């Protein structure tokens, strides 16, 4: 079990990671999720022993302070794989086994098994330069798993790949990690990637841990409005607008509400009324932007497409919104506005 | 642009440099080949064999090989730890030490030779070690001169070497030394191989160092050529040796080129934060300190020696530089020789710059056809050849072929600057070509698409990219020309000697007065080159000096 207690890392006196405490049980996959500059990669490197950190980093109750990277037994996989270009695929995967002086025959067998596991059976003699981005990441994963690490550290393992491949590989990654029973700590800025691979999520902002929990917990109860937006909610409403929406949903009032794109649905019997600003057809349904009285612009879905300017009644889907525990200032929300579109 | 116009531009750009190279490089060198291998119009291998059978020639050949090899190994062994310490670690005084360790790179070989003599010679601080006139002294001199080449070439590669493969290996369980052997050194191999081959080349063609430190007992091919020409007047012997050297050097360059091009060129380059030193860096720091001592020792000895007259502190040696010296006097005062050197260097760097710029532009224009591409590649290679031909060979070739007939240029005052320009030309081309080559051609297309004509495009796209390297390489050519000695010693006219030539003459004369003046003159020459190179260094052009 990995345990972090009040871990901090500072560059030139400026804190990149501040007082982060976390626990990670054996066999579990935890995603460190945060925007760029949130300190998530720095934290990962500190765990790997590549950055000097204060606080306590422990494994099974024993501190790893002073233990150099190569003796920690934590394998590290980088965003772009970092395959050794002068070694073949087999040479890369077998690198750690060579270090442990595992006999050649066993090594070959294990390399073949690992390549099979990552879906690259028979790739032993290829050179990294001849592989596609996805294949390279698979080799990097096999190489890291070959260590039989106590803990696998993944630094943005899928970010360098294009969207379709990323989705496919995320599923594979989850399957492989669970099959191998590997404890893993993954850094990502992409909430979809985190949801696709991890069991639990730790949300970082400005070097601090803002929320931690299972996927379901975090998604259902974002700690604040920034977290809601970063996790993939489409809009956050505050103040009177939030209270109006919550009342229409039959929920108790709060200062803010986070909405998914499908939080409103066109319904002739709906309690809210507004005028359509725009309508766009998608393969499954129509997506509307509607201006609601007392609320402002919101996203909604509809089975048929009303023309812009028409008035429309909306109902609220209570299971497609969440009530953040607190409101954080605009300045923090700005950052997350660049995040990919909502689920 | 139409294809005829493109080819026309290529021809127009390349015409002048090619003509100069043909008359003042190819002609002399082939002329010498002829003289060495053909006698009375027919090829007579027995003459060649007779030359090669001579014991002093074989000694020189063997000495060149083993001393250069050993010096190369030592330069790499001392240069690598220093390159790491200076480019990957952070410690106080680092910038000063780095600049200091790079100084020998540009010091004229004559100065280095004098500095070593001052340290280990009869009256030197290390005289009791009895190194004077031994191969050890020559090899130390070569290492002194060439470790900086290794630091420069490998340090630049190491500085931007992506640390993540090493970190990945460490996370896979590799110890630091394991990471060094299995990841870092393989990644640095191209830089190390090219540095080592350049160092071997410099060692094998080192002239001034061997001449000043080797005395009468030890000769390299290079000094043997010089002695055969001027002491024994054995021109065929000198020509045979020059041809031999040419073959060996070109062969070496080809092999080095092969070795260099093997590994994956797509190494990622990144900006790396430097690590503070810790206890485990002690071996590296110790090795760097040894190198610092090796570099600082002779230079300090030179400086201190130049300030002593008759065992007292005095500026007398410097004052004497205004005079033609003592018994027998030089043809001109040393200060006049300095002015001559400066004037020649200005002319030489101007010529090298114009020719280099023309070549660089001709080589880096985009080719549309395969034939065109091949022509540009051949041009590129052609202007590298002067690098492979030792300066002494070039000087001798010019001396032999331009002395008669229609090409009787031997006494022309522009011959020395031109020869020096040819020596410096590869450095200029090597600095400019990577810069121009790295300009994305789409930028030029974008400029053209916005309505810029060819000249305007060059002004908007190429000139901003190239002006800094241009200054840097002209400074480099200037420094190289100031210290140039190999070719100059053959071509210089008696009444207009350059400073390095004067230094060597002073050294070859008896008397402490002459010796003191030589020390002072060497200090002046060293200071002049160091100032120029420090200015060049400030421009921070990465490709400078990377051969």
Image: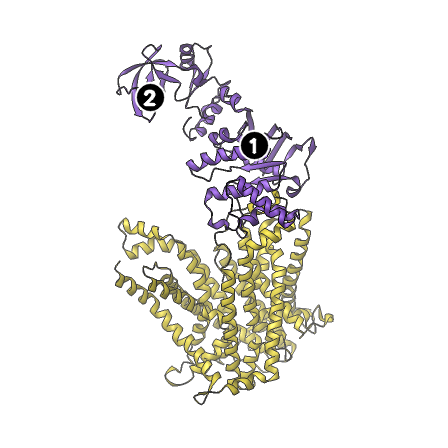
Chain colours: A purple, B yellow
Residue at image location 64% in from the left, 42% down from the top: A69
Residue located farthest toward the right when viewing the structure as drawn: B128
* Residue B121 vertical position relative to residue B37 in the rendered view, above or below: above
Q: Are marks 1 and 2 in contact (CB under 8 Å)?
A: no
Using a 10 Å C-alpha cutoff, classify the residue at mark 1 as few (fewer than 14 neighbours), some (14 to 19) or many (20 or more): some
Can you identify the residue that label 2 sits on? Answer: A289
Residue at image location 64% in from the left, 43% down from the top: A70
Indicate which label's residue lies in the foreground, 1 or 2: 1
Using a 10 Å C-alpha cutoff, classify the residue at mark 2 as few (fewer than 14 neighbours), some (14 to 19) or many (20 or more): some
**Could you tell me which chain the residue with mark 1 belongs to?**
A
* Residue B10 vertical position relative to residue A129 in the rendered view, above or below: below
From the top left corner, tell me how far across and down residue B200 is, in percent: 56, 67
Using the numbered discs, state the Cα–Cα distance from disc 1 to disc 2 in whole angstroms. Answer: 41 Å
Residue at image location 61% in from the left, 83% down from the top: B55
From the top left corner, tell me how far across and down residue A119 is, in percent: 50, 40
Kindly state the secondary structure of the residue where label 1 is placed. helix
* Residue B325 vertical position relative to residue A82 in the rendered view, above or below: below
Front-most of B200 and B399?
B200
**Could you tell me which chain the residue with mark 2 belongs to?**
A
From the image, which quarter does the C terminus of chain A lie in? top left
Can you identify the residue that label 1 sits on? Answer: A178
Q: Would residue A75 be found to the left or right of residue B495 on screen? A: right
From the top left corner, tell me how far across and down residue B216 is, in percent: 63, 80
Q: Earlier in the sequence, mark 1 or mark 2?
A: 1
From the top left corner, tell me how far across and down residue B459 is, in percent: 33, 55
Q: Would residue B440 be found to the left or right of residue B202 on screen? A: left
Q: Which mark, residue B21? A: none
Residue B338 visible: no
Residue located farthest toward the bottom when viewing the structure as drawn: B40
Kindly state the secondary structure of the residue where label 2 is placed. strand
């Amino acid at each position: 079990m990995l345990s972090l207690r009040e871990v901090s890392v500072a560059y030139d006196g400026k804190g990149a990671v501040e007082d982060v405490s976390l626990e990670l049980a054996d066999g579990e996959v935890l995603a460190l999720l945060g925007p760029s500059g949130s300190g998530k990669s720095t934290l990962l490197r500190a765990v790997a022993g590549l950055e000097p950190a204060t606080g306590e980093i422990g494994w099974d109750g024993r501190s790893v302070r002073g233990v150099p990277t190569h003796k920690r037994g934590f394998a590290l996989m980088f965003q772009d794989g970092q395959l050794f270009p002068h070694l073949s695929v087999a040479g890369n995967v077998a690198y750690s086994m060579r270090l442990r002086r595992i006999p050649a025959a066993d090594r070959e067998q294990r390399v073949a098994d690992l390549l099979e596991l990552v879906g690259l059976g028979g790739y032993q003699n290829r050179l990294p330069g001849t592989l596609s981005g996805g294949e390279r990441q698979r080799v990097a994963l096999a190489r890291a798993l070959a260590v039989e690490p106590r803990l696998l550290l993944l630094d943005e393992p899928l970010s360098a790949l294009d969207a379709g491949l990323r989705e496919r590989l995320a599923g594979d990654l989850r399957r492989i990690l669970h099959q191998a029973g590997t404890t893993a700590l993954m850094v990502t800025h992409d909430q979809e990637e985190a949801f696709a691979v991890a069991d639990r999520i730790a949300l970082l902002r400005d070097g601090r841990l803002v929320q931690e929990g299972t996927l379901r917990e975090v998604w259902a109860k974002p700690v604040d409005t920034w977290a809601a937006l970063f996790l993939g909610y489409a809009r956050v409403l505050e103040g009177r607008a939030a209270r109006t929406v919550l009342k229409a949903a039959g929920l108790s009032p709060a200062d803010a509400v986070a909405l998914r794109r499908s939080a409103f649905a066109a319904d002739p019997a709906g309690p809210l009324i507004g005028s359509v600003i725009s309508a766009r057809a998608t393969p499954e349904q129509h997506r509307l932007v509607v201006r609601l009285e007392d609320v402002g612009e919101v996203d909604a879905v509809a089975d048929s497409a009303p023309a812009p300017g028409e008035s429309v009644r909306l109902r609220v889907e209570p299971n497609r919104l969440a009530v953040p525990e607190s409101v954080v200032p605009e300045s923090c929300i700005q950052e997350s506005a660049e995040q990919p579109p909502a689920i | 642009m139409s294809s005829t116009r493109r080819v026309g531009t290529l021809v127009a750009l390349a015409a002048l440099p090619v003509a100069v190279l043909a008359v003042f490089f190819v002609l002399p060198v082939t002329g010498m080949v002829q003289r060495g291998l053909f006698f009375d119009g027919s090829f007579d291998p027995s003459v060649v064999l007779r030359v090669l059978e001579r014991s002093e020639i074989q000694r020189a050949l063997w000495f060149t090989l083993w001393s250069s090899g050993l010096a190369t190994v030592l330069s790499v062994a001392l240069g690598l730890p220093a390159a790491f310490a200076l480019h990957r670690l952070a410690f106080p005084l680092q910038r000063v030490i780095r600049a200091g360790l790079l100084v020998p790179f540009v010091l004229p070989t004559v100065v280095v030779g004098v500095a070593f003599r001052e340290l280990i010679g009869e009256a030197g601080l290390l005289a009791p070690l009895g190194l004077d006139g031994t191969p050890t002294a020559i090899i130390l001199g070569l290492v002194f001169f060439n470790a900086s080449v290794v630091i420069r070439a490998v340090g630049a590669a190491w500085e931007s070497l992506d640390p993540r493969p090493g970190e990945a290996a460490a996370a896979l369980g590799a110890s630091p030394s394991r990471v060094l052997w299995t990841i870092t050194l393989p990644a640095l191999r191209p830089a190390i191989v090219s540095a080592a081959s350049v160092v071997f080349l410099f060692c094998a063609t080192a002239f001034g160092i061997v001449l000043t430190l080797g005395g009468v007992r030890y000769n390299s091919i290079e000094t043997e050529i010089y002695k055969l020409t001027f002491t024994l007047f054995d021109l065929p012997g000198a020509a045979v040796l020059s041809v031999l050297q040419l073959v060996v050097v070109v062969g070496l360059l080809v092999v080095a080129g092969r070795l260099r091009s093997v590994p994956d060129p797509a190494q990622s380059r990144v900006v790396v934060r430097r690590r503070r030193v810790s206890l485990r860096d002690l071996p590296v720091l110790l090795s760097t300190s040894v190198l610092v001592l090796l570099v600082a020792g002779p230079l300090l000895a030179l400086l201190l020696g130049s300030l002593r007259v008759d065992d007292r502190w005095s500026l007398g040696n410097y004052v004497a530089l205004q005079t033609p010296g003592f018994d027998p006097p030089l043809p001109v005062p040393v200060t006049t020789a300095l002015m001559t050197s400066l004037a020649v260097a200005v002319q030489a760097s101007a010529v090298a710059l114009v020719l280099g710029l023309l070549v660089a532009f001709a080589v880096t224009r985009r080719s549309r056809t395969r034939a065109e591409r091949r022509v540009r590649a051949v041009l590129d290679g052609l202007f590298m050849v002067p690098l492979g031909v030792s300066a002494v060979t070039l000087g001798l070739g010019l001396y032999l072929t331009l002395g008669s007939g229609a090409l009787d240029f031997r006494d022309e005052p522009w011959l020395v600057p031109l020869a020096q320009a040819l020596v410096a030309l590869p450095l200029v081309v090597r600095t400019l070509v990577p810069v121009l080559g790295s300009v994305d051609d789409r930028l030029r297309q974008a400029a053209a698409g916005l309505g810029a004509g060819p000249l305007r495009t060059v002004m908007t796209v190429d000139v901003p990219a190239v002006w800094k390297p241009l200054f840097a390489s002209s400074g480099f050519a200037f420094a190289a020309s100031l210290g140039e000695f190999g070719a100059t010693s053959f071509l210089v006219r008696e009444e207009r000697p350059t400073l390095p030539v004067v230094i060597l003459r002073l050294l070859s004369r008896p008397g402490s007065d002459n010796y003191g003046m030589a020390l002072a003159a060497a200090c002046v020459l060293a200071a002049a080159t160091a100032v120029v190179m420090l200015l060049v260094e400030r421009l921070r052009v990465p490709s400078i000096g990377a051969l």
